[in-house]
Amino acid sequence: MEPFVKQAKEDGPVLFTIASWMEQYCELTVGFTSRHGGVSQSPYATLNSGLHVNDVPEHVVRNRELIAEAVGQPFEAFTYAEQVHGNEVTIVSLQEKGMGRASRETAIQAKDGFITNEKGIVLCAQFADCVPLFFYDPVKRVAGLAHAGWKGTVLNISMATISLMTHTFGSQATDIRAAIGPSIRACCYEVDETVANRVNHVLMDINASSEERQAVMVDKGNGKYMLNLQELNRKLLLQAGILSSHIEVSQLCTSCSTDLFFSHRKEGGSTGRMIAWIGLL
């Protein structure tokens, strides 16, 4: 069953929430935006949340405000970073609450992962094909979010996020719930030998079997490969100690579904950004 459930109100942003998490944990808001329900014009139509893609800044901020209204949390709670496709993870406290919501200059700089145990903070990360990773420890009440493109994935940002949750707040990996959100899937994600070699090193490091390797990457010949970033991230989550029964994986492909989502690959780089969000109420 698809864990990300479409939520649409009349004349508002179309959102996808992890409904099972929000039903089980009433203290949590968590989900992923679509491309619909905002004010941006083509090619960013309409719910672009990225300030770095040459959209009109006032439109982007308005879209972010609309998302906050639809989520039902104050705009001042939404906290953004300048992402760099790395594996640096930071703790977000009340001091950082709301950073980056209205400008890039005020965003948390050079981070791709975030954790918090503070109520009233909504962590946000931006996507247009890369893999959103959501984390929640219901025992210690710690939320986390990570941006995993192929670079962040091979740098194991999932392990970095879990380690910070463990060392900072005492989380146990077996308690943590994880979700892999809508992103470009193996049906659409062709990569070259440079990327494939990095992925192969990771697969060797985790002692993946030949069947497991085949599930992650398929050789098309001529130096081209079809890469399943979701499955690679799932394996890395398992390697980090997350229970298989605690991992949700979306089947929604951003490249296949440009009627719902922005796709950097499918739309030739000229497109908007969705956000993933998670916050403690």
Image (cartoon, rainbow, N blue to C red):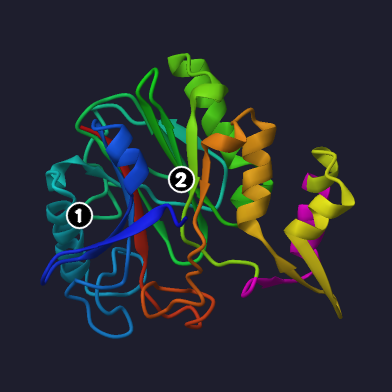
Gap in angstroms between the C-alphas marked 2 and 1:
17 Å
**Res 150 seen here:** no
- Labelled disc at residue 110: 2
* 152 lies left or right of 71: right
Find the residue positioned furthest to the bottom. Answer: 42
Instruction: Find residue 64 and report its horizontal and vertical position in percent.
Output: 20, 59
Q: Is residue 48 or residue 229 the one in the foreground?
A: 229
Q: Is residue 125 visible?
A: yes
Q: In the rendered image, which quarter is residue 151 located in?
A: bottom right
Earlier-in-chain disc, 2 versus 1: 1
Tell me the magenta residue range: 187-202
Residue at far top of view:
170
Dot 2, crowdedness within 10 Å: few (<14), some or many (≥20)? some
**Residue in view at x 24 percent, y 76 percent:** 46
Instruction: Judge from the rendering whether residue 148 lies leftward or rightward of residue 99; answer left or right.
Output: right
Check if residue 188 falls in the magenta segment.
yes
Instruction: Identify the image quadrant of residue 116.
Output: top left
Q: Which disc number belongs to residue 102?
A: 1
Q: Residue at x 32, y 67 (%)?
A: 34
Q: Quadrant of the C terminus?
A: top left
Residue 270: mark in rendering: none
Residue nearer the viewer, 215 or 269: 215
Q: Is the magenta stretch mostly helix, strand or loop?
A: helix
Look at 29% across and 51% down and name the residue there: 105
